[in-house]
Amino acid sequence: MKFRLILMLLAVLCLLGGCAAPDGATTDEGYDDLIVVGFSQVGAESDWRNANTRSMQQALSAENGFRLIIDDAQQKKERQITAIRNFIHQGVDYIVLAPTTEDGWETVLGEAKAAGIPVIIIDRMIDRSLATGEPGDDLFTCWIGSDFTRQGNAAVAWLEGRFGSTPVRIVHLQGNYGSSAQVGRSASLDEGLRRNPQWTLVARDSGDFTQAKGQELVEAYLAQGIGFDVIFAENDNMAYGAIDALKNAGLTPGKDVTIVSFDANRKALEMVAAGEIGFDVECNPLHGPRVKAVIEQLERGEAPLKYTYVEESAFDSQGLSRELIDSRGY
Ligand code: GYE
């Protein structure tokens, strides 16, 4: 009897020990010495996004000392909020957020802050008014991403160089409304339209950064008889869809219609080399190693830079070599 009681006590102690493993995972799963990271990802809407997810998986691997939990929000903010709440309940060590849109993060990031979990934001930003940059006064530890307005300005400057004072009719395929990538790139085109009165905006809609919607929109414009000389596609996947729509209608991309795009995925660079895309502005998705470096800094008790803008370039067919295309990791 006494022996059975001792055994039972031992079993209970074992269980308790397991539950109290430092990273919130149980010992019998073997996670106790890994850093647990909950990553709320926007979705899988584009090649850029998939490259971004892969980069995170590769950098935050078990071999590197991490346990990465990814939640795919399918481009829905409500799902991201639920995912973050789950991460808080699970007691993860860090939360990484790639926010779909900029607004609506105050409450849930306040909850993460109250739970003492550092939040690293990647890619797009949250509402600037929440990002005051004052230590202790904001809801995230740091941000790593791109300067989307600078990207947009590069595309506009290229169009200005290409067309000079010639009148052009522009179709604008936008990303999902309210995302920093859409807000920044669209702001640049708006500014370009103000500066160049000979430019006319003939159609503008959101294709949500997907190939299917990019194709649908351009098919609809063609069916409505809208004439255009330029497509300003806010990412490569929408440009791919637009190119398919043009070809199906017997038009030649690069000849009948000039296309500018963003991301500069490997496939898109091939299209730049082939003359189908006129200009492609690079957007670097490889944030995994950057996030890893930030977490390692935080683990050592150091303060990472609040904002890190990644360095990016842009390509037309002249600036492209075979070597560069072949060395592209995404
Ligand atoms: O350009 C697009 C993706 O936020 C930078 O989102 C990212 C954008 C990227 O779906 O392809």
Image: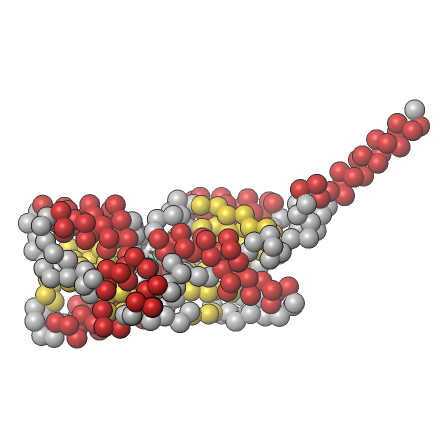
Quarter of the image with the C terminus is bottom left
Quarter of image, ligand 1: bottom left
Taking the image as shown, residue 179 lies to the left or right of residue 303, namely left
The residue nearer to you, when weighing 218 against 325, is 325
Residue 139 showing in the rendered view: no
Colour approach in the figure: secondary structure
Picture quadrant of residue 301: bottom right
Taking the image as shown, residue 263 lies to the left or right of residue 143, namely left
Figure disc tally: 0
Q: Residue furthest top?
A: 1
Taking the image as shown, residue 16 lies to the left or right of residue 179, namely right
Quarter of the image with the N terminus is top right
Residue occupying the point 40% across, 61% down: 329
Indicate the position of residue 97 as horizontal and vertical percent values.
Answer: 48, 55
Indicate the position of residue 3 as horizontal and vertical percent values.
Answer: 92, 29
Residue 317 showing in the rendered view: yes
Question: Eyeballing the image, is 187 above or below 37?
Answer: below
Indicate the position of residue 102 as horizontal and vertical percent values.
Answer: 39, 57
Residue occupying the point 35% across, 48% down: 45
